[in-house]
Amino acid sequence: MGFHIVKRDICPLWKRCCFYLAAIVAALFIGALVLLAIGVDPLEYYYQMFTMGMVGNRIAYKTVMNYLRDFVPLALTSVALSLAFKMRFWNIGGEGQFIIGSITASAVAFLLGPSLPMWLTVILMCIFAMLAAGLYGLIAGFLKIRFGTNETLMTLMLNYVALYILYFIGETKESWNFFLQEGSLRPVFESFASLGSFPSIPIGDKFQLNICVILTLLIGVGIYVYLKYSKQGYEISVVGDSMGTAHYAGMKVKRIILRTVFLSAALIGLAAAFKVGTVGVLSTSITNDVGWTGIIVAWLAQLSTPMIFVVAALICVLQTGSITAAATFSKVDSSFANMLQGAILFLILAAEFLVRFKIVRVKKGEKTNE
Amino acid sequence: MKKIIALVVAVLTIMTFVGCTTPTENPSKDASDLKVGAIYINSKNDTAGYTFAHHNGIVTAMKALNLNVDTQLFIVDEVPEDKAQVLAAVDTLVGKGVDIIFGISFGYIDAMEEASKTYPEVIFSHGTGYKSNETNFNNYFGRAYQARYLAGIAAGLKSLETGNNNIGYVAAYGTEYAETASGINGFALGVQAVNPNAKLHVKKLGAWADEVNESAFAKELINSFGCGVITQHCDSAQPQIAAQNANVFGCGYNSDMTADAPEAHLTAAIWNWNVYYQTAMEAAIACGTADKFVETMGSSAYYGGLKEGFVDVSPLSKNCAKGTESAISQVKNIIVNGEWDVFSGEKLTITVGEDGTATITKNAADLKDNAGNVIVAAGGASVADGVITGTMNYYVAGVEEV
């Protein structure tokens, strides 16, 4: 008697869904044990978490608006990262590209906002944020194709360069620094909501649907089509599969890499412009960690664009819901959400193993023919 | 006579008007109905540091008022100084139905102001800030400089005893912030009241918390500047531990640090946040509706000191020099009864007799900054609170940044 690990040829969709569902349930079960251990009713906690505290909440519409404001940058950043990942370019510089994008978009709002109509300011914020973030991403791309540097390390380190630029801007009270409030005793970021904010569509008498939500969904469809049906999308997957093949097929590999890296980073810049154009003020934690969470989302969705939207939506429920649930239970702090997120991620990866392989029992002398 | 009649008519009109608009309203709400919300910069499960001090204060205040922490307290923690995230935290708390929201970090200032307009039915109370309105939004902070002055007396007496006039100060920031500058100046004046020859050496961290440098800077003050007493304006007890390791003495901050450095620590300038939180919660219960909160509090800025017990010095340790107890309690007395305050045109001179009793004399003297400019002329009144919280961007004479 023994066990063998055998590769599956195909795994039907229903079976895959079952595995993933089981993984999530198992993670929630682990979380429930922790909650029980600290004396919190897990059912009540999860109820609060999955409903994001909206039941019986007189300002539930605010919860939805806050939820969408977190969802937009995360979904768009994840889609952008998946572009690079498909090509096996490990862009883990989402944080840095997001920061550069948000600084640029804010700068455009401050400098051009006063003299231009709002709609033009907003468009320019998007364009400049995309250019700046795209070029920032290109640094790692260029160094890779020119000198063969490791893009993982380069993009990682560039995250910190961008972060410290943001800290510098946020802490330096000088006459040139138009990002900060003039009258404040301590350095505080100035709001530019009146200069460059994305419009919202009112639905009902209170809810406001920010136009960025619609734009993000449209961009998602666009990227899906681009990857699936365009020549460039095909090139990305060939380069991802084998650079040699791409080369022999006559593809200009270096150009494809640069183009895709730029597009990936530029979309992250756009996500940043959406974020600052919605909240109307910069902050040193403007990214809300989307550059990191986006990597998890992209991989959990296995780089499939529609799945990215689903996973991003679920992760946002988890994050928003955890804050609400933690507010109710004084013993649970917001780190519980991180633990639960980690448990889900690990168990999904374990489920991934079961999707690809199966474990069969073999008796001695018997051969596995599967 | 006409005027009096007009006045009576006016008063009656107002009374009927008020009576008409709020015929059934209960002026104060039941304490068991009060829901308290709080937004923290770090985790509510912290066991030391800034967030811990506030959480501890809120919980202590709630217990004193017989409020149930499990059902009446709602917290969103680990909220960075990001306007959108603070506003989202406010939405979460308002969704839970809280009556009052405490925001403890300075950078929440704009979000708190905006939220107070969005939700006029909720009270917003912002720690360390300076914005407010006349109805439902106030700010709170304390006269830490008074407690610093008392700790300075302990340090000064120790310097007399050891014969070492160099005193070191590890500060988060210096003259950039009135909060740090007023603390440094208060401490320096306390030292000088007992030891006019003492010199205060200030070393800046450039950060509110930086454990590595907090220790390193204390060592440098001891080794390079010969400091015999080390005090601090930073988060951890590292400077006190460094003082103990170098066999010198120290005064802590924020909480009693005697346990961290039992052989070095004299006394610490401390905050009793529960004093404010209890006052605010009582006002929130008494005011009935949120728009009456500031009126009930009496002011839109709460600035409590030794008198309210909001700031104090921790119990004096065995390391304190003879007479410290007597000197501190007498000075505390004249501050509490409003007879004297730290930044005024009157200087205290404290001497300790053979029997350990301190004698305090008040003399008119110019309060000068360390460039020689007169801040308060001899005999003048204390500087305005706005200066202490906002524009005190200088050091008093005898302080040197190194």
Image (cartoon, helix red, strand yellow):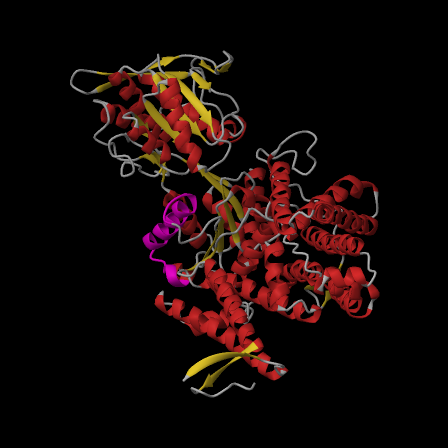
Tell me residue A14's x, y (percent).
61, 83
Tell me residue B45's x, y (percent).
40, 54
- Outermost residue, front side: A365
Q: Closest to the observer: A192 or B283?
A: A192
- Dividing the picture into quadrants, the one containing residue A228 is bottom right
- Dividing the picture into quadrants, the one containing residue B242 is top left
Magenta-highlighted residues: B47-71
Residue at 35%, 26% (x, y): give it.
B230
Tell me residue B46's x, y (percent).
39, 50
**Placement of A157 over or under A362, stated as above or below:** above
Q: Closest to the observer: A98 or A53?
A: A98
**Placement of B53 over or under A32, stated as above or below:** above
Residue at 46%, 58% (x, y): give it.
A335
- Dividing the picture into quadrants, the one containing residue A313 is bottom right
Q: Closest to the observer: A85 or B372?
A: A85
Q: Image quadrant for the N terminus of chain B?
A: top right
Residue A332 among those drawn in magenta: no
Tell me residue A248's x, y (percent).
80, 62
Residue at 51%, 25% (x, y): give it.
B175
Residue B246 visible in the picture: yes
Query: Would residue B109 appear left or right of A175 to someone viewing this image?
Result: left
Q: Main secondary structure of the magenta part?
A: helix
Residue B66 among those drawn in magenta: yes
